[in-house]
Image: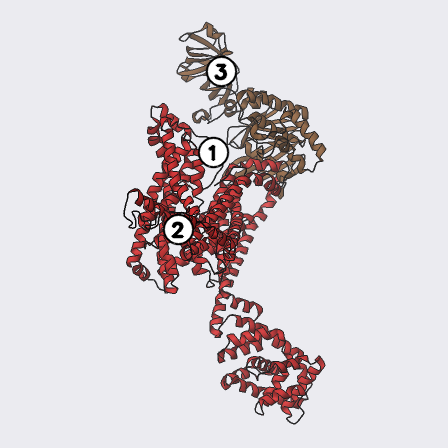
Amino acid sequence: MVSGSTVQKALPRQDRRPFVTKVVLLILFLCALAIIFMGIHGIRAFDASGFSSEAAFHAVHVLAGETDRAWQEQLSPALSQLDAETRSGVRQAAKDLLINAWEDTDAADAVLGEISGEKEESLLWKLLYATYLTRGPKVSSSVRKTLSALPDSDAAAFRTDTLSCVVHPDSEVPEAAISLLEKAGSEERDAALVQACFATCLKDSADDAVNTLKKSVRDASAQLKAYRMIALGEVSFVWQFIVSNSRSVILSGILLAADILLLTFLMMGDGTWIMDFKWVMILIIVDFLLLFQLMPLVYMLIKAFFPDTTFSLETFSRLYTYPLNLDALSNTLIAAFSTMILGTVLAFPLAWLVGRTNLYGKKFFRSLFVLTYMVPPYVGAMAWLRLLNPNVGTINQWLRVLFALSDDPGPLNIYSLPGMIWVLTSFYYPYAFITISRAMEKMDPSLEEASRISGSSPVKTVLTVTLPMMLPSLISGALLVFVAAASCYGIPSIIGSPGRVHTVTTRIVEYVSLGQQGMNDATGMAVFLMVLAVLILFISDVLLAKRQYITVSGKSVQPAIVDLGKWRTPLTVLVSLFAVVVVFIPFATIFATSFKVDVGKSMLRQDNFTLSNWLTIFGRGETIACLKNSLIFAAVAATVGIVIACTMSYLLQRTAIRGRKIPDFLITLGSGTPSVVIALSLIMTMKGNFGINIYNTAWILIIAYMIKYLMMGMRTVVSAMSQIHVSLEECSQISGASWLHTMFHITGPLIFPSVAAGWFLIFIPSFYELSMTTLLYSTTTKTIGFQLYEYWTFTSQPMSCAMAFGILLIVVFLNFVLNRLTKGEFSI
Amino acid sequence: MATVELKHITKSFGDNTVLREFSQTFQDGEFITLLGPSGCGKTTMLRIIAGFEKPTTGELYIDGQLVSGGKTFVPPEKRGIGMVFQSYAVWPHMNVFNNVAYPLTLKKTPKAEIQKQVERVLQIVHLTQYAKRLPNQLSGGQQQRVALARALVAAPGLLLLDEPLSNLDAKLRESMRFEIKEIQKQLGITVVYVTHDQTEAMAMSDRIFLINRGVVQQSGTPEEIYNHPVNQFVADFLGKVDFFKGEVKDGSIVFPQMGGQALPYDGPRTGKVEVAVRPENIQFDPEGPLQGVLEAQYYLGDVDDCRVRVGETLVRVITGGYAYKTLKEGDRVRLSVRDQMVFDDDGMLDEKLQIQT
């Protein structure tokens, strides 16, 4: 019974908690609305002010403080030294000066009429002081120096004397003011005297604010407004902050509101209304993704349909009737589709031979094919260009000799749609290969054994059991190739552009370089790519109801191995031939070209061999700077990315917290979005128009890399974590370890190889990225990938080949590091 | 060395209540088994004691100290309990010695002392020569012993075992059963053991708690539970049992589905009943009250497992191996029944519980 009554007592407390939480949420939501409202009000106030820059508000705030201080500490004491008659005389003079200075008598009268009563004198002087900051007689710097050099007591006397001189023309003018008076002449004698008095008050520290005010408030009526604001101290610190950062304020208000709504939604579903720290983690990640991924994409979509704030399909009808764009569209679709078919047709037998048969050297082949995945596509494009150039392509030269053809260009031409498809295929088939071979290795061998025991031949088993079982991963691998090929920029830009084979991506980049109108058109083209990508993502995720991603994973169970019998040697030769054509020849070409003077001639000729390309790229400061940029950006993206990845893995694998799937979905969406689209949407939203200005900085690149590649890292860590049974952690806990201790000594060491692999999976593609960098770089944030592209296009092909091979070496080296770091468990 | 006191413990996941009003006290040095089919709530109970789950209501005391209930909640790492997990949870990145030493290093025990203690428990579980091995170089049974050693090394007063033997092969399971019991006797600790295997429970426990659908059906010594089950579920879960529908009439139970044959009865029940009989309690007996035809017999060496058709009902009889030699299929036989258990007919036979053993 005792325990029963405690339970009874505890209940009301629990009943109250949801109520308190709801009230707090409501208050926070209202705060968010208030923040948004203030931001909007700030924008309105700025628009109404007529100031040309938000900085003016800050200046007004600073000067209001300065004016008040000058009045309190200097002017007021000076005035109190005067006798009553003089004082009222000076006041009258000050009024006249003010009206004089403001030129607009009506406005001056209006303001003067407003101020009356006790504060009249102080306001009057403050107004005058503020006015003279920009409108009074000029004080030369030498005079100012003399005045500010006066000791405090002298300065005070000086102020009293100059003011009294205004009323008593005959009295002696203080020495320091004489030069000022002489310059002014008799008409502006009073003004000069007052300005001399003010000049002793003004602190040097206010100079910046005065300059800002002069620069950004030029219009007369705006100036009057500013003086009035200064005198009345109307601009508080908070207010000037809101006005000068109004867009950021609105944005943070909206984010906060969205967070609160999301949190409310989550809590409503959870039902207990108890705040959980994990929600904060989710909200932080969601905020990041909302801000830098979803908002830009949505804005881009809106912009495409509402180019000038009204709904219009004008952009689309113009874009998609222009023959060049139609060409680009059909090229993209044809190229992506052909690459998908070719790539899958290549990948399936390769995956089967390498994964499930006793092919000679299958481990070697597997690493080789997977490694291609880590090679920048543009390097492949360069290699094939060298091989199949219609005039000087090595293969073309051989073919001409071999078949005794004339010296006309050809017979093969890389600058064509089929040429592009070939290069796309040779670089994107690994996507399908990895997906299929992973599924193949995971497949339960007894399924095939059952088919064999039922009387089916090995080949028939492949066709009737293996292939149908592989169908989902086959399709998702194929779709992966499709999206990758459709959104590729590197290969079309190197092969397509010279051959006038346009694709959607190259058109987008061309449009962006055209400026404002081009931007609209680029958006219209990007929408096409995005719809395509989202459609495919939907198909492979929802319709196949099976998530297949390219991730590395640890060792798997040994599947049944098919004995190839007499076919073993011929098939090995065939696969080797494929490897030579697709992997060895291109890389060798790059390597060879990097030592050439004239790309058209053999490297082995005495006069055609040079090391200068290598020496040049290693000796050039610019290249080194670009390399450094690439390394730093990729490292930052990978590090921040892997922190998010680990947090997400923990949330996904170790908690049942509601809403953990939301960031997961956004991250998947991000990686499915074509690079060019991500870059374009960031350009449109990150240049200050939404309160965030990171355009032309390293951050915009880093964020773009993270959005594109975060998922690869996340999947890797998630799959590692899913393989660690939760009891390993619980056992540590019951042994007496805290959560942190467990994470460091049990979970950490166990998932470390995957975390390292995840880091590299974000790092490597970020390191050589080209598509997004092309759109987002600035002169100080060029990366090695972009530098290579510039060299290729504008400088020298051999030199860029040297650079490409350098990049290749770095990637291979990183792979080696990863392999060592994870004790051979991972390599890519 | 430790008592565990559970007061009105209820646990719900959303609308699903997996434990209802669990109130028990486990005495010092007792070997307690929580037995029941999967999903009955026994593992949840164990995890509540360990501190991996918070009870929805109720209080839990270990050694008289409140560890869970009201606003108090002592996390698992502060409870000083040893636990062996079903999956062993031997950390693959540490060798045997480090795995076992882990709880002691957390207590900042001096190195020499750790060495001594680890050697002591490794000796208890017969793993002394494997100290430097990595878990993937050990067999399942050895890994299981590493887990046991690790749970014992800090000399806990309370040891929790979550189906520790379910992943072992039959022979090993049998020998580990006795080893665990031996260790418990030797150290005098309190053990809470979760299993769905009734043989394990019978062999080791001082007291068994048979749980079904979150409610304790019966608790008591193995003998009490086996011989005096309080309801059909308990009777059915422990050992082999067959149920027959009958009706009490004039000092005997008539079985309509046995062609109206009857057994003498002098108990208190009336009307419709269910009679539970263990096959080993039915014997071939020329004087027996029931008559039938031997339909099949399976020779198992130590016993003979027979099926006898009595009326429309097939009755299972387990008898000594010798019967195989004397009877053959098709023989008319008579049966006598002893130790039958008679329950009110609550329709339980019709719904026939899904029991996985």
What residue is at 62 percent from the left and 24 percent from the top?
B180
Q: Nearer the viewer, mark 2 or mark 3?
A: 2
Q: Nearer the viewer, mark 3 or mark 1?
A: 1
Write down the quadrant of residue B133 in the picture: top right
Q: Is residue A224 above or below residue A38?
A: below
Residue A556 is labelled as 1
Asked whether, in this view, residue A463 is left or right of residue B222, the answer is left
- Work out how far the residue at label 1 is from the one at label 2, CA to CA, in angstroms: 46 Å
Asked whether, in this view, residue A206 is left or right of residue B236, the answer is right
Q: Is residue A431 something that shows in the picture?
A: no
Residue A599 is labelled as 2
Q: Position of residue B142 (x, y in %)?
A: 58, 26
Q: Is the N terminus of chain B in the top left, top right, bottom left or bottom right quadrant?
A: top right
Looking at marks 1 and 2 on the same chain, the residue that comes earlier in the sequence is marked by 1
Q: Nearer the viewer, mark 1 or mark 2?
A: 2
Q: Position of residue B297 (x, y in %)?
A: 44, 11
What amino acid type should be assigned to the residue bearing mark 3? Pro
Q: Which residue is mark 3?
A: B279
* Discs 1, 2: same chain: yes
- Work out how far the residue at label 2 is from the one at label 3, CA to CA, in angstroms: 93 Å
User: Could you say which is closer to the camera, residue A497 or residue B23?
Assistant: A497
How dense is the environment of label 2, judged by Cα within 10 Å: few (below 14), some, or many (20 and up)?
some
* Chain B color in figure: brown
User: Could you say which is closer to the camera, residue A632 or residue B209?
Assistant: A632
What amino acid type should be assigned to the residue bearing mark 2? Val
Q: Write down which chain is painted red.
A: A
Question: Which element carries disc 1, helix, strand or loop?
Answer: loop
